Image: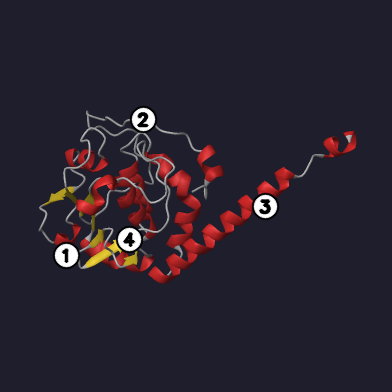
Amino acid sequence: MNILEDKLEHVQLGEETDDDSDDTSSSTEDDDEVAPNFPVAMWDFNQCDPRKCSGRKLARMKLIRCLKIKQRFPGIVLSPLGEKCVSPQDREIVESKGIAVVDCSWAKIDETPISALKATHGRLLPLLIAANPINYGRPYQLSCVEAIAATMYITGFRESAKFYLNKFTWGHSFIELNKEILDIYSQCTDSKSVIEAQNKFVEEEQLKQTQRKAQSDFPSSSESDSE
């Protein structure tokens, strides 16, 4: 999928690994970073390399709470089994009850007992491009911290999104790579309008790519003159 091909070229690719074993912030905190006042949690299925897992790093930094597999979470739960997309309409739930994410391997998603979580507010994320070193440039395959930050951003907690992302050397790239579409999502009203905005964005990007390809197929004026 080449929807954001041009954007990928202008964002610096992170290192192949993110082994931040010292658990210190990878960047200085800016004035527009604010730690959230709501809970952030995850279910860890122990399927990822702990040296590269953003969720594990957040846990070591005490920025995320680890839940037991059958432990319920009352807030927004980012899960492949969610029935609708995160939207600005979820702001009140996030603010009062928080965000939780499922930490599992994309390669093992089919064998992960996600249904055991029984989330009250299960949500999917709309189209976003990963900036993490493992899945860089791939749509939807976000790390834990990217998923959490995207939810914060869309629901109006941009400062908290930056606070979490800036704990990683590559974190700033996620917003740089997706800022246009994140801003669009954050201006929507509900899940339905987020999906509509996503589809419109994809169509417009595909049209731009088609137009650029058509223009590149025409000979330049110097080539025409030489003939």
Question: Which quarter of the rendered picture does the C terminus lie within?
Answer: top right
Front-most of residues 17 and 220: 220
Amino acid bearing label 2: Glu
Identify which residue is drawn at 38% across, 53% down.
158
Marks 4 & 2, CB-CB < 8 Å contact: no
Q: Label 2, label 3: how many angstroms apart (C-alpha)?
A: 34 Å
Query: Residue 166 is drawn in which quadrant?
Result: top left
Q: Amino acid at mark 4?
A: Leu
The residue carrying pointer 2 sits among few (fewer than 14), some (14 to 19) or many (20 or more) residues within 10 Å by Cα, namely few
Local packing at callout 3 (Cα closer than 10 Å; few below 14, some 14-19, many 20+) is few
Residue at 50 percent of width and 53 percent of height: 180
Q: Position of residue 163 (x, y in %)?
A: 32, 45
Q: Which residue is mark 4?
A: 124
Q: Which residue is mark 1?
A: 118
- Distance CA(mark 1)–CA(mark 4): 15 Å
Q: Earlier in the sequence, mark 4 or mark 2?
A: 2
Q: CA distance from mark 4 to mark 2?
A: 27 Å
- Residue that mark 3 sits on: 211
Q: Mark 1: which amino acid?
A: Lys
Q: Secondary structure at mark 4?
A: strand
Residue placed under numbered mark 2 in the picture? 16
